[in-house]
Image (cartoon, helix red, strand yellow):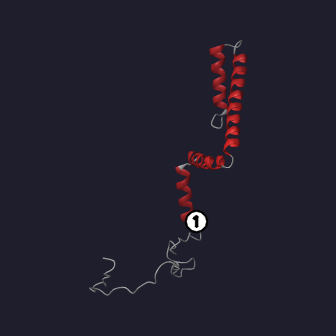
Amino acid sequence: MFDSVGWGEILVLVVAGLFILGPERLPSAMAWLGKTIRQVREYATGARDQLRNELGPEFDELRKPLDDLRGLRDFNPRNATRNAVRRTLFDDDPPQKPNGFAPGGAAANGASTAPTPHPATPPQTERLAPNERPPIDPDAT
């Protein structure tokens, strides 16, 4: 809950509370705040447990999209860009795509690499000569 609050912010809040409430009321206000936070946390835990008991295994399915959103909240585009550039520049073996295409077109030893054909792709036909008309498929038009 307080992951983004550092010690500096807590110190500023305590000093502001000291000036606003005064030294005689600050301890009782901090105790009240602690009790309130504890009570809210207990309510949230009880509600989560009750939902888990009522929904059973469906509760975990409901949590998956929330976990995905939580992961997106921690997404940093600057780090993602850096990681993509690092992978592109420094990885020895570039990833091979499902269609057999490997970026770069050459192996690490300099030999050209022909992409491996995908099992579902038809065999490659010969290229047309210059000014040659392509064959027409009447079923396709």
Residue 117 locus on image (x, y percent):
51, 80
Q: Name the residue under label 1.
A: 90
Q: In this view, does 52 lie above or below 123?
A: above
Give amino acid for label 1.
Phe
Q: 136 or 49, which is in the foreground? A: 49
Residue 63 locus on image (x, y percent):
63, 46
Q: In this view, does 14 lie above or below 52?
A: above
Residue appearing at x 33%, y 77% in the figure: 140
Total numbered labels? 1
- Quarter occupied by the C terminus: bottom left
Q: In this view, does 56 lie above or below 130?
A: above
Q: Residue lying farthest front?
A: 54
Residue appearing at x 70%, y 20% in the figure: 32
Estimate how packed mark 1 is, as few (under 14), some (14 to 19) or many (20 or more) residues with alpha carbons within 10 Å: few
Q: In this view, does 53 lie above or below 15?
A: below
Residue 14 locus on image (x, y percent):
67, 22
- Quarter occupied by the N terminus: top right
Q: 86 or 77, which is in the foreground? A: 77
Q: 110 or 99, which is in the foreground? A: 99
Q: Quadrant of residue 42?
A: top right
Helix, strand or loop at mark 1: helix
Residue 73 locus on image (x, y percent):
56, 45
